[in-house]
Image (cartoon, coloured by chain):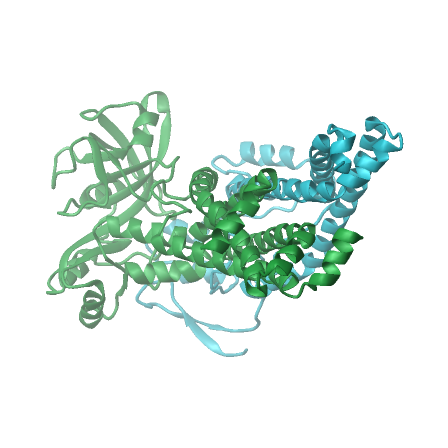
Chain colours: A cyan, B green
Amino acid sequence: MGDVVSLSAEADGSQPRSFRIVGAYEPTPDPMRLGAARHEVRLHLPDLIDLQDTGSNQLDTERVDAINVAIAPGSDAGAVGRRISTSVPGAITQRTGNDQRRTAPFVVLERFHLAIAIVTVLASSVFLLALMLMLVEERRATVGVLRLIGFRRSRILQHVLAEGVVIALAGAAFGILLSVVLEGGINRFFQWRYDTALVFVRITPGVAMRSIAVAVPLGVAAIFASSWSLLHKEVLALTRR
Amino acid sequence: MRALIFGARSLVRQPGRTALGILGIAAVGALLFDMLLLSRGLVVSFRDLLDSIGFDVRITATDSPLPAGVRMKDATRAASDVARLPQVAEVLPMRTANGEIVLSRGRVVPAGITGMDPGTRHPWTIVSGVDLTPRATPPEIVVNEQLRDEIGVAPGSELTLRAACDPGRAVAAPRTFKLVGVAQFPFDDEAQSTAVVSRDALREACGDDRDEADMLMVASSGGAAAAVTAIKAARPDLYPITNEQIVARMQTQGFTYFRQISAVLSAITLLFGFLLITVLLTVSVNQRLAEIAALRALGFSRMRAAADVFVQGALLVGVGGVLAVPLGMALSIWLDRILKTMPGIPSAMHFFVFEPRTLLTHVALLVATTLLASAYPMWLVARLPIAATLRSEVVG
């Protein structure tokens, strides 16, 4: 801090200008530049224009890449944008919250993660079905005894479904709890890994509800499917007599 | 061998459970295989793409190996200095600019313009028409298929191009070019409109007399590393970089996200596979306690009983793992298609690329998972008290 450095806009370092370092800053997190070593400096705009001015073009001193506009509270951003577009010919106005060029990669990544989630759910479903098949097999004798003492198939099925709902809800709740616990750790790891303040994982109520909406019917369906053959077997076959 | 047959029979005896176990492992294995393909896919694909052009060294004016940065001044002299080196086979200066094709009724189609003289190596592939010829009059232009479809003209037609070469300068007057060919450019993405003209023609279209280039494309004659050393010695003011170095730089900066996501998902998939196999084998062992105790009473050793469990696990993972490879390849096509819609990704690049080492890693990880997952049920079987188990399972 306080050192004087030379900056040049030319590749060969010609026409350098001296600047004093007065501070260091944390760059605004930019998902597009994740992992990149960012070498940046901030200057006063007139100093930057002066640094780039080659004297060959009068317009050089009038040129900026963009003008950031903060609209007054309550104003309609769209209307302001349209008004600027019509009153300043050649100007392109764009809302910062609607920059499709910047968000496009993240829309693609969201689709990719959804595809991975679909495959994971399919694999989990097979796992669940295999597990339930084994668990139901263990209860073959219990179901047989229930049938022998007069329980109807529909009554046993109700029990099975109720148990399925409880297990699926408990599993989904545990899964969400686990992800909430892991959320902080994952974020801290990637923030450390990429030296960024970006948030990588955020468990929102919407995400939690979507997980429950997928997990519970899937769990119930697995229990139902695995119990189906057992409930339709003869009583004596169940009790192995 | 006996253990193998015995284990196989145990699995066949419960076909539903076995089929579901194999299916589950195949699905998990497919995802694991895809994550392994993803972990190096971009790097391998990017390296192949760079190498396919025929130039193995790039020279820029600054440390950045990408075009559209600070331009190199006096590029023709720099190119001839480099071309004189014995380690260099060919040098082509390249300059890029933005432009638009002006069509009738004022309609314009924006396009990325590359100014590059035709050499013996071409970073593009002509698909119809012919390539650029040196010093042609009127100046010639080759466009990519996307741009050809947008402007709707065929080779032999004339085009009006307005080039914007410097954001600080007024756009130059439009120039007329003769469209001589349609080409595929390796770094184009699906929606990119690109055209190439000679460097002199681009300079004229830009309306300036500056002899600048974004980079010099160099083909070495005796290896890229030797060429870089020679270039650095001859022109210390330039920044030569080999394809390998560009790939290494992209690996540490540009592609880290996919490496990380692949590592995380691989770990989760392995954990999932481990749980799946452990649970399947453990529950299976628990259901067969009486049978195992009876076999032990008949003379099966601890080792033999444990080997039976291991063989069952190995067969489940073996069959599932084999199925996982074609399943993973099919899945990777779908996932690759999703990721390639990301803007700026060249059409020729792929996120999932097969390498023999990926298959070896996949097999090694599945073997390790089988060993770990079988350990607990094998331990259960090995320490099973024969008499107590028979009493509780059969008599009880």
Foreground: B202 or A156? A156
Residue A239: x %, y % from top left: 78, 37
Extreme residue in the top direction: B105
**Quadrant of the rendered image containing residue A106:** top right
Please tell me how many numbered marks the rendered image carries. 0
> Residue A88, can we see it?
yes
Q: Quadrant of the N terminus of chain B?
A: bottom left
Q: Give the answer, above or below, for where A192 lies relative to B193.
A: below
Foreground: B232 or A131? A131
Residue B394: x %, y % from top left: 75, 52
Foreground: B257 or B391? B391
Residue at x 73%, y 59% (from the top left corner): B389
**Quadrant of the rendered image containing residue A233:** top right
Residue B325: x %, y % from top left: 43, 45
Residue at x 73%, y 34% (from the top left corner): A227
> Residue B258, can we see it?
no
Extreme residue in the front direction: B298
